[in-house]
Amino acid sequence: MTLSDQALLAHDPESRTLPGDIAIWLFILTELVVFGLLFVGLEVGWRSAPQTFAQGARTLHVAAGFANTLVLITGSFLVASAVRSIRQGYIRACVLLLLGGMATGGIFALIKIAEYQTLIDAGYRLGTSIFYSFYFLATAFHLLHVLIAMLALLIVAVRCLFGAYGAANPTGIETAASFWHMVDLVWIVLFPLLYILP
Amino acid sequence: MAKRALIITWLALLALTLLMWFLRGYRGADWLVFVVLVLIAIKGQLVIDRFMELRHAPVLWRVALSGWLFIVLGVVGIVRATSGA
C-alpha cells in the first residue's frame, strides 16, 4: 500500500462517516424518492400501454443512451478521484479532476440535446404518446440534475483553486461529489427503463 | 478510496454497461427483463458502495440507498412479471 493510500485510510474506515455535508444526503434521499416515483409511474404507464412503449423505445437512439451511461460513469470516476486527491492535499489535481467531471456532464448534455433535436425533427413531441411524455419529462428532469451537479462541481473547483479545501477539510468537495454520484445512479436506472426494457 | 479500487470500480461499471449493450438485441425475450434488472442492481450497488463510499458510512445510509435501489427494481420486476405481456 502506498503512503498516500495509508493517509487515505487514516481519514476514513473506523470512523464510519458520511462523505460531505449531511444536508446534501437529505437532499439526495429526497431526489431519489422523486425519481423513484417517476420510475414507478413509468412502469405503470408501460403496463397500461405496452405496445406504445415498445414502439416508442424503438425510436430512441440506444447508442446515444449507452454512450451517455459510459460518460456519466467516467464522470463519477473522475469526481471520486478528485475526492481522493483533496484528501491527500493535492489541490491542483483535485481541481483538474473536478473540471474533468464537469466536462463529462457537458458531453452528456450535448448528446442528450442532439437526441432531443433528432426526435423533434422526426416529429416526436412531449404529447405524441404517453411514452414520449415520460421520455422527455424524465430525461429532462434528469438533465436538469446533471446541470446542477456540473454547477456544484464548478463552484467547488473554483473555491478549491482559491484554497478553500485541503486534506483537513475536504467536505465541500465530498458534498458536490456525492450529489454527482446520485445523478449517475439515477441514470443507471433510468436509461434501461426507457431505452431497453419496453 | 484507494486508487486501484477506484479504477477497478470504474472498469467494472463500464464492463457491465457493455454487457447490457450486447444484450440489447434480445428485446422481447422473457429473461431479458430479469437480467437487465440484475445488471442495474449490481451497477447501482457499486456506485452506492464504492463511489458514494456508503460502504464505510453509517449503516443506516447504506441501507437507505440500497433499499431505494431494491424497492424501485423490485416494483419494476413485479410490474413486469405480472403484466402477462
Image (cartoon, coloured by chain):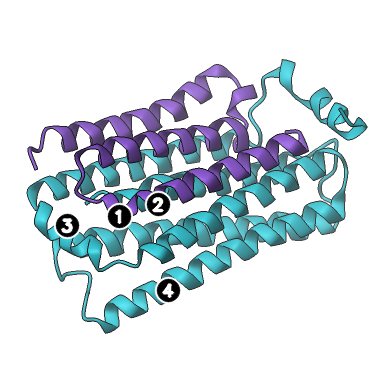
What is the drawing colour of chain B?
Answer: purple
Quadrant assignment, res A57: bottom left
Tell whether A128 sits left or right of A147: left
- Residue A182 appears in the figure: no
Q: Are marks 2 and 3 in contact (CB under 8 Å)?
A: no
Give, as a three-letter code, the residue at label 2: Phe
Q: CA distance from mark 2 to mark 3?
A: 21 Å
Q: Are marks 4 and 3 in contact (CB under 8 Å)?
A: no
Q: Which residue is mark 3?
A: A53
Whether discs 1 and 2 lie on one chain: the answer is yes
Residue placed furthest toward the bottom: A121
In front: A157, or A78?
A: A78
Element under disc 3: helix
Q: Which residue is mark 1?
A: B25
Residue underneath mark 4: A113
Circle nearer the viewer, 2 or 4? 2
Residue shown at 44% from the left, 46% from the top: B19
Compared with residue B39, is residue A18 higher up or lower down, i.e. above or below?
above
Q: Residue at x 81, y 44 (%)?
A: A86
In the rendered image, residue A158, in percent from the top left (x then y), is placed at: 76, 61
- Residue at image position (24%, 37%) is B31
Q: Amino acid at mark 1?
A: Gly
**Can you identify the residue that label 2 sits on?**
B22
Asked if residue A183 is positioned above or below residue B55 in the image, the reply reads below
Q: Chain of mark 2?
A: B
- Mark 4 or mark 3: whose residue is earlier in sequence: 3
Assess disc 4: are there few (<14), some (14-19) or many (≥20) residues with their C-alpha within 10 Å of its C-alpha. some
Q: Nearer the viewer, residue A60 or A46?
A: A60
Q: Colour of chain A?
A: cyan
Query: On the rendered image, what quadrant is the N terminus of chain A found in?
Result: top right
A19 horizontally vs B42: left or right? right
